[in-house]
Each structure stands twice: as structure tokens, then as C-alpha cells.
Image: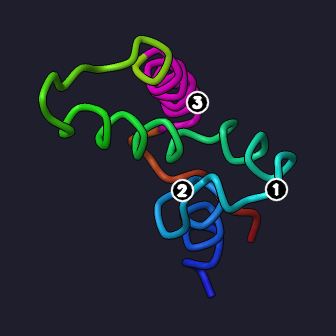
């Protein structure tokens, strides 16, 4: 059950299904998450004859990485939290 969000994101991000087959509103929802930008970035970087990275995809991935790092720095602790006994 824990992997269901990942599979759902894979479908709406164009990893399993071409994005052109999705409704417009679902396509926009999928573009919010980083998997869509990672998939598109990898596809465009590997397609000949001129592979290139899209600045938008790299920027969105960088923003998600910065947000994740910020949350991790604020929430991480070396010592476990004390539990009320």
C-alpha cells in the first residue's frame, strides 16, 4: 500500500502513459510534481541528434531539492524524540 502514490504519480507524470493521452487538467496536476520534470528531462536529454536539458525541468527539480533539504534540515535530529510514557 505504501507505493500507491508513486504509481499514481508515475501515471500522471508521463512515465507509464504518454502525457498526450491524459486530460488537460490531469496533465497540469502532474506537472506540479518533480517526477514529470525528471521524466521529460531524461527523455529530452537522451533523444538524438542534439540532446539538451530544459532549464525549466532543471529549475523545478532544483526547487524540489531545495524544499526537501529545508524540511530535512529543520526536522532531522540525531537523537530520537522523547516519547511520553
Q: How crowded is mark 3: few (under 14 residues within 10 Å), some or many (20 or more)?
A: few
Q: Name the residue under label 1.
A: 23
Picture coordinates of residue 83 (x, y %)? Answer: 68, 62
Between disc 2 and disc 1, the foreground one is: 1
In the image, is residue 35 above or below residue 31?
below
Q: How crowded is mark 2: few (under 14 residues within 10 Å), some or many (20 or more)?
A: many
Label at residue 71: 3
Magenta residues, as a range?
59-76
Q: Name the residue under label 2.
A: 14
Was residue 31 drawn as part of the magenta stretch in this picture? no
Was residue 66 drawn as part of the magenta stretch in this picture? yes
The answer to which of 2 and 50 lies nearer the viewer is 50
> Mark 2 or 1 closer to N-term?
2
In which quadrant of the rendered image does the N terminus lie?
bottom right
In the image, is residue 13 above or below residue 54?
below
Between disc 1 and disc 3, the foreground one is: 1
Amino acid at each position: 500500500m505504501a507505493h500507491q502514490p508513486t504509481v499514481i504519480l508515475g501515471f500522471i507524470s508521463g512515465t507509464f502513459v504518454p502525457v498526450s493521452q491524459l486530460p488537460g487538467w490531469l496533465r497540469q496536476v502532474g506537472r506540479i510534481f518533480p517526477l514529470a520534470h525528471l521524466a521529460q528531462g531524461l527523455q529530452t536529454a537522451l533523444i538524438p541528434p542534439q540532446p539538451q536539458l530544459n532549464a525549466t525541468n532543471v529549475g523545478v527539480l532544483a526547487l524540489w531539492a531545495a524544499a526537501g533539504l529545508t524540511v530535512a534540515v529543520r526536522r532531522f535530529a540525531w537523537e530520537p524524540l522523547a516519547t511520553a510514557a
